[in-house]
Amino acid sequence: MDYTPWIGRSRQREARLSAGDIERLAAVLDRASTPETVPPAWHWATLLDAVRQSAIGPDGHPERGDFLPPIPLPARMFAGAEMTFQTPLALDTPTVLTETIEAVDEKSGRAGALTFVRLARELSQSGALRLREVQTLVYRDAGATPTAAPKPSETQAQWRETLTPDPVLLFRFSAATFNSHRIHYDRAYAERVEGYPGLVVHGPLIAIRLLEALHSQTGDAQLSAFRFRALRPLFDTAPFAVCGRIDGHEAELWAEAPDGGVAMTASATLV
């Protein structure tokens, strides 16, 4: 399919960044208090696209073909993102979000046909760019989940935290980020339609928990960049671990699956 007409497509919306959105996410993450500015990656809980119920597709995502291209492959995953931070986003402040489709690429892998969409997102306040993020979304056939188990990390962790995902946590994170993808809360759909062994832990939730573990080590140290890549899904069927180490201004982060393999890799640059 020719996706050329969608490349370069852009949309923009403006709203006052709500402290309530951050307060709800802080509660989901079990923070003792609400941050005074938006921590790295917490912007996922802000400026949410209020799609009408009649415009929701069978997987719980908004129907395709409006802003995002009408890719026919049924399953969608958030495969990774690259973020650069200028200054922290301020709360209760008018904020402009500009989204642009940078690329659409069709490929073939071990899981079959794949289509990758690169989506750039820029958040500005008072006319100045505060954060730029480029998301990578991947579409694939339902049931074609990754089968190869990535090897355990050879990097020695300076910290490791074990997390136990459960349906309540996944539902609350879905609510805090207005994510209605059914793989995170509808067990019958996740298992019978998309072929997963359980409810899928959100990629953004894993990424934020990596950052939360880093925050516990560095306190309020600012970041200039954060990058993550999802390698395999995690499920509510077993605990997983978030691990990391710091070398100078660079932090290496990863999520460890129950079998010891790496489910997500990430890196962060401290100011």
Image (cartoon, rainbow, N blue to C red):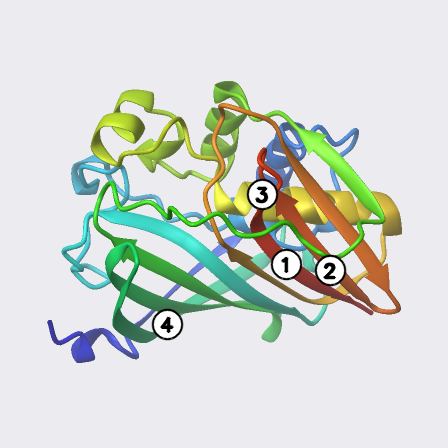
Compared to residue 90, the image places residue 233 above or below, namely above
Local secondary structure at mark 2? strand
The reply to whether callout 2 and callout 1 are in contact (CB within 8 Å) is yes
The reply to whether callout 3 and callout 1 are in contact (CB within 8 Å) is no
How would you rate the neighbour count of disc 4 (Cα within 10 Å): few for under 14, some for 14-19, many for 20 or more?
Answer: many
Residue 185 image offset from top left, x and y in percent: 38, 26
147 left or right, relative to 23:
left
Would you name the residue on which mark 4 appears?
100
Residue 161 image offset from top left, x and y in percent: 75, 35
Compared to residue 214, the image places residue 187 above or below, namely above
Compared to residue 35, the image places residue 122 above or below, namely below
Would you name the residue on which mark 2 appears?
252
| Between marks 4 and 2 in the image, the one whose residue lies nearer the viewer | 2
Mark yes or no: residue 17 visible: no
Q: Earlier in the sequence, mark 2 or mark 1?
A: 2
| Between marks 3 and 4 in the image, the one whose residue lies nearer the viewer | 3
Q: Quadrant of residue 7?
A: bottom left
Real-space CA distance between mark 3 and mark 4, rounded to the nearest whole angstrom: 25 Å
Decide which of 98, 269 is in the foreground and name it. 269
Would you name the residue on which mark 3 appears?
206
Would you name the residue on which mark 1 appears?
266
Local secondary structure at mark 4? strand
Q: Earlier in the sequence, mark 4 or mark 1?
A: 4
Q: Earlier in the sequence, mark 3 or mark 2?
A: 3
Real-space CA distance between mark 2 and mark 1, rounded to the nearest whole angstrom: 6 Å
Decide which of 240, 71 is in the foreground and name it. 240
